[in-house]
Image: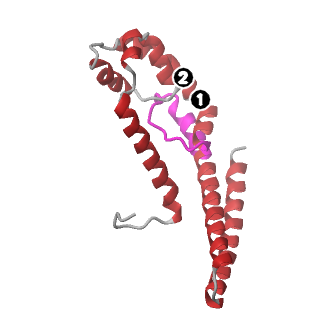
Amino acid sequence: MGWGFTVNGKHKQQLFTLMRVAAVCSLASLFAGCASMSAEECRTANWREQGMRDGQNGQPRSYLEEHREACGKVGVVPNAGQYEAGRAVGIKYYCTPANGLNEGRQGHSYRNACPPELEPAFLDRYKAGYRVYQAQKRIDSLVSEQRNKQYQLDKAKDDNTRDSLRRQLRDLDYSLRSARDNLAYEESRLR
């Protein structure tokens, strides 16, 4: 790409995701910006319901500032009291152990949104789910690398290259078995 660095297989997916998010925000900024709310949403907002939705989505308390900035552009000031009252209800739906497990398994980042009384149980299950997510991502990465090596082997012409690629494929097979064992272990820890 000419950026002065190389990206290995492990970080390629992360870089691709980051580039995709940046592209989406760039395109969106041409039309409406990457604002938390549109001008129309700001004008018609029920701040209690907005707070409840944000709480259910695991948005941190500071997310109100995003709304304040977005809505300030059209002269709307969020009702912080109503927003906080709604968020206090919504966050209870987000900060459950079951949802923590689900969020972790999906690889979502935790934004320190849960109140202190709900956070320990949420985080315990979130971390367990996130370990499963990481184990699955490791498998996916190894499978992708294995496909790439197999493709290289299929195209290789000389024996030394083919021998090297076969050794690499055997090593990948071993790593893949180990990664699958790790995934099974992490899934068993969920029970």
- Report which residue position mark 2 lands on: 92
Residue 25 horizontal/vertical position (percent): 40, 38
Circle count = 2
Q: Nearer the viewer, residue 27 or 57?
A: 27
Mark 2: few, some, or many residues within 10 Å (few <14, many ≥20)?
some
Q: Is residue 23 magenta?
A: no
- Please identify the quadrant where the C terminus is shown: top right
Is residue 176 shown left or right of residue 69?
A: right
Amino acid type of disc 2?
A: Lys
**Image quadrant in which you'd find residue 29:** top left
Residue at x 30% of width, y 13% of height = 76
- Please identify the quadrant where the N terminus is shown: bottom left
Do the residues bearing badges 2 and 1 touch, measured as CB atoms within 8 Å? yes
- Report which residue position mark 1 lands on: 96
Residue 63 horizontal/vertical position (percent): 38, 27
Residue at x 72% of width, y 66% of height = 177
Magenta segment: 105-129
